[in-house]
Amino acid sequence: MKTQEYTVVGTRPIRHDGADKVTGRAQYGADFQMAGLLHGHILRSPHAHAQIRSIDTSKAAKLPGVKAIITADDFPQGPDRMVDLGEGDTPLSYARGNVLAKGKALYRGHAVAGIAAISAHVAEEAAGLIEVDYEVLPCVLTAPEAMREDAPVLHADLKTKEFGEQTGRTSNIAEHFRHEMGNIETGFAEADVIVEREFHTATVHQGYIEPHNTTALWNNDGRILIWCSTQGSFVVRDVTACILDVPVSQVKVTPMEIGGGFGGKIPVYLEPVAAMLSRKTGKPVKIVMSRKDVFEGTGPTPGSYIKVKIGSRKDGRITAAQAYLAYEAGAYPGAMVGPGGMCVFAAYDIANVVIDGFDVVVNKPSTAAYRAPGATNAAFATETVVDEIAEKLGIDPLEFRLKNAAKEGTRRADGPKYRRIGCVEVIEAMKNHPHYSAPLGGPNRGRGVAVGFWFNIGLPSSCTISVNADGTVNLVEGSTDIGGTRTSIAMQAAEVLGISAADVHPTVVDTDSVGFTAVTGGSRTTFATGWAAYEAAQDIVRQMKERAAKLWETEAASVELERGLFRSGDKAMSFADLAAKLESTGGPVVGRGAVNPRGVGGSFSGNIVDVEVDPETGKVTILRFTAVQDAGKAIHPSYVEGQMQGGSVQGIGWALNEEYYMNRDGAMTNSSLLDYRMPTALDLPMIDTVIVEVANPGHPFGVRGVGEANIIPPPGAIANAIYRAAGVRMNRLPMNPPAIMQAIWNQRD
Amino acid sequence: MSGKMRIQTTINGEPQEFLCEPRQSLLECLRDTLGLTGTKEGCNDGNCGACTVIMDDRIVTSCLVLGVEAEGCRVTTIEGIAKGSELHPLQQSFLENAALQCGICTPGFIVAAKALLDQEAHPSEEQIRLWLANNLCRCTGYDKIIRAVEQAAAAGSEVKA
């Protein structure tokens, strides 16, 4: 599986920010301090759906220590327009409305007012003194309910878009799209076995350990300075500028270290509020969310209702597949059902397909991306149905998947035709893994498998590199480092330059100091910013060759760089020796790379999982877990494994116990980390990993990106394992003890 | 607002005096008053372990301890784990094993793991998992953290031998 021999790529150097992060020196957003700092707090709606009749801040304003209070009326009130929030276009009124509710509160936790005071305690106290007159409205919490004709309507101005056309009809369905390929009737007519099942999946949260935070200063020169934890400093810059109606260049965002995001730290919540409070007070304002605010006021990932129908011939070839995906967008459109539609059958080569997707608004927090957003819900359904068909046909579940696996040239129902992909290789690696044939070793145990696909994204990235006289280089980039990407980016530059990873000093800088760089998301950072670093390093090599040529009085074209040595004829000089001569050969050397890569390569992943189901309680124990994923090329294998392990465990949490437990009034009743029970070290075995490397032809080192595909298979694989352990097919997430006991009892009846 | 109290403690081996309001948590005092921001806040209700410190040889979540309770106590935070410029074996092991991704939970894990190794030099995998069950990590799936603690335990016994 070796793609090519490299010196640096594929090794495991210690990460550049490591010492800071194990000693507590690394500065995260909440650690930021500056003189004169005020502390902010957000007042949030206690109702899931309510008209805001009036907001009286007079009592709160009189509390000693309170410096300013703002509501939506303090934001600019210009006409609506479409803005890009980092993941596609949204009406500005929705972006602004989610930051501070205007007219209506659309979910419990919806921000209603912002307070700045001399301490966070005083600001919180003041929030309790703000009097909001709410007219409580009926709320609607799930997609199927919200799609009914008589459902309470969230947005009077939201018109349903159907098959790309505006219908002019007001409803909670923001969009209905359809992908069609072949002939679905003929396809099902050719099938010997057809399985159709319904699925419900609960709303879940990304669960990053660091709450959202920001500090903003509306400076006396009119510039807005922001320090925050974000997946995209340029997104914060651009969205804040839009909401406050100022030019983007008026905002400067300094990304602090970030304590996890998984997609949830792309949206902007606090920055415009802190900036407005700063403008009113003339002082910097810092706001840090509580954990409850994180659960109730930031984007979880959609709950969903899904139907999947698949038909297969006796010989194990799938003839047709149909999906109905209704995803809860939360309060504003954008349920990530589009990616769900792209991924639902993406692992399979199927001639006849229909996929219907519905983006449905409900009275829950506006949803955000969560690691392969939309794909996990869809794959849970598909992989369960595929497993059931394989069982009915008496075919091994991996053999069945292999017979139908997507490969180069396979067309997906949403349009694209695959270039070189690693679906077959991933399934083969699963089949060949000793785990797949190991004995289960006890009663009430079962083994399940599932696969998943994520397309990955490209988007712009920028990077500059300057050469130091001691033969090292400084690398400047704009991608927030959530999981070791300073190093995976630096390693690609080091490989080109023929120096060690330790000789590259990477720094993540503010939006004034580097070219536009899109979010750390979509598994794109090592792929795209790594590519920008590759280009910047190539630029250095070109300039260094010119310097060598000047020294040797020869043509630059005759100079070669190999393993850190510049050569021309019988002359040779190391990178370091040449770096020491820059001053005498023309001055500093600075390279630049700016890319918007098209050669994105999708990533496939697969899981083998063994579970034990306690027949008395329904508790599921994960006994053994193997994660396989096509990385294209693993730049730093340890951090690739880390992504696979982390994504797998998030998938395990999603599968077994995480959910927004909502009461009928739309209140989340488990908004603490005790009750929103994420997996702990005690719940898990070691997570074995197998990195498959089918090089992406669209990247200089073959990188595909590994951040996301790993979260997709766990719910399906675990459901299939539960079936073999306990004899019940689960069609609901989470598959917690009550759900499993219910299924067991239903089967007995 | 009530008046501030004067608290005398020992933090990371040094005598330390600070003023705090009765309602302030030790976490708040460490971070906002003393500038020891290596101790992190993830939930402020004792459920994530990011604010773990050692207080008189016991690990506590400092968000659930009042600042005034630190009177007369010895407190060790992440800033006190390394010996001068030399990393503690756990810190070194976390780096070598890539046992952190975003790093926000790392101080809490290292402090908690140090307390474990101080009382049990050779913990089993199960013991490590049980001990660290109060520390949440959302990035790593714990695999590399457990391995890092195992390796540090092995390294520690080599040093002693």
Image: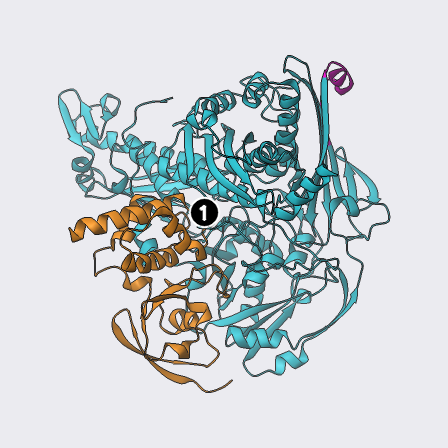
Chain colours: A cyan, B orange
Q: Is residue A235 left or right of residue B12?
A: right
* Pick the front one: A463 or B147: B147
User: Is residue A208 shown to the viewer in this render?
Assistant: yes
Q: Residue at x 47, y 36 (%)?
A: A625
Residue A337, x across and y down, in percent? 66, 38
Q: Is residue A450 above or below residue B111?
A: above
Residue A488, x across and y down, in percent? 37, 39
Among the 4 quarters of the image, the one containing residue A377: top right
Residue A117, x across and y down, in percent? 54, 75
Q: Residue at x 43, y 53 (%)?
A: A510
Direction bottom: furthest residue: B3
Among the 4 quarters of the image, the one containing residue A123: bottom right
Q: Quadrant of the C terminus of chain A?
A: top right
- Residue at mark 1: B139
Chain for disc number 1 = B
Among the 4 quarters of the image, the one containing residue A700: top left
Q: Is residue A339 magenta?
A: no
Q: Amino acid at mark 1?
A: Cys
Q: Is residue A679 left or right of residue A111?
A: left
Q: Is residue B75 above or below residue A322?
A: below
* Pick the front one: A254 or A331: A331
| Region in magenta | A178-192
Q: Quadrant of the N terminus of chain A?
A: top left
* Pick the front one: A130 or A248: A130
